[in-house]
Image (spheres, coloured by chain):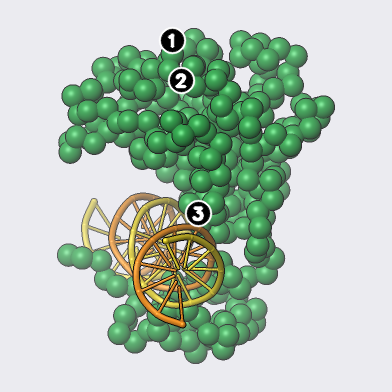
Chain colours: A green, B orange, C yellow
Amino acid sequence: MGRAPCCDKANVKKGPWSPEEDSKLKEYIEKYGTGGNWIALPQKAGLKRCGKSCRLRWLNYLRPNIKHGEFSDEEDRIICTLFASIGSRWSIIAAQLPGRTDNDIKNYWNTKLKKKLMGMLPPSQRKPPPFPNSHQTPPFQSQPLSSTLYKECSLSYYSPTSTNKSFSGLEPISVPLNFSSNSTTTSLANNNPCLFQNQETWLSSMQQYYNHHHPVKENLLMFGSEGSCSTSSDGSCTQISYGREIKQEEMGFQSYISNGLEENHKFMLNYGSNNIIGGGDQNMNHWTNERANGYFGEIPFDYHGLEDVKQLISSNNVSNNSLFNNIDENKTQQEKVTYLY
DNA sequence: AAAACCGTCAACCGCGCGTTT
DNA sequence: GAAACGCGCGGTTGACGGTTT
């Protein structure tokens, strides 16, 4: 049985909103709120619109403090940093950019930022890395995860201004996450998108989010940027990160962005003794070491072989021409941390 | 001047998940 | 426990305006 439609499609208006509709919706919500029921709202507000459409219009356009227009370098940086780490989880990224909506960021990424990053690479590297054939199934080794692993999570942030720039010498600026597995939080969005009051709130929410929505599947510990690969039945190959599938394109950009972030941001999600690395690069050395504690088959990609990745990283193709090169290298480590939050 | 092409972005759609009944 | 419901998310579409040919 198919899903029942959310509204009577025949009797709802579609397409662009008129100023009259906007003001009706705005007035109603300002007066009565959403009432926690978007489906019923349009009728109450006298609108011939689907509830979902009203919700979208309100969230993306009408609600107060929406920011439109150009994205700042700061915002670019945050988007890239988070994309490199968590992929296209636009709602989470939007939560770090007050006034911006997930839709905005998604559009901005797809139409501008992605190209901006591409443009930073030499032409030969602008294509996403090739996908392996179906027969290149990686020799997965699974490792059961203890439930405590979920709780022992922190996010470490590495600054290039650490006293020792080599990876082994990086010191994490970490905030422990006191995640309670019986949390009733259902999604980050419920935590008031846009507005995590501080680093800890965000981290906590991030962890809750991943534990709820992306539990590590199949008893596999899955690393982020360059590690693992699964082959689906149709022969396509997907990378798994944080227990979710990552598309080919996203995967390619993760490595691109990692380059871009080389001089600026490093951060790592630590699950117990197993690290999941985002925004990596020099992390690779450390990553290699950490494999002793987590998933580690052979690196499945030709392109993504460790040496290839290292080479890509060491070439500095992106970082020398970085999108983020306006960072004041004299900033303190603590100041730099704030870029993330 | 007009057609073709391209980029942007608001809006739609389907799905997954949590909650309620 | 199952079904129905509603919300939120991410991917995609299509209208529109600008640019190029």
- Callout 1 touching callout 3 (CB < 8 Å): no
The disc at residue A36 is: none
Q: Amino acid at mark 3?
A: Thr
Q: Residues within 10 Å of mark 3 (few under 14, many from 20)?
A: few
Query: Do marks 3 and 2 share a subunit?
Result: yes
Find residue A292 and name its label: 1
- If the image is split into quadrants, where does the N terminus of chain A sit? bottom left
In the displayed structure, A182 sits above or below A285; it is: below
Subunit that carries the residue with mark 1: A
Whole-angstrom CA distance, mark 1 to mark 3, is: 40 Å
N-terminal-most mark, 2 or 1: 1
Report crowding for label 2: few under 14, some 14 to 19, many 20 or more residues within 10 A (C-alpha).
some
Query: Which residue is identified by label 3?
Result: A111
Q: Residues within 10 Å of mark 1 (few under 14, many from 20)?
A: few
Chain ID of residue with mark 3: A
Secondary structure state at the residue bearing disc 3: helix
Q: Which residue is mark 2?
A: A309
Going by the numbered disc 2, the residue's amino acid type is: Val
Write the residue at 37% across / 31% down. A129
Picture coordinates of residue A293, whole percent (x, y): 44, 13
Q: CA distance from mark 3 to mark 2?
A: 26 Å
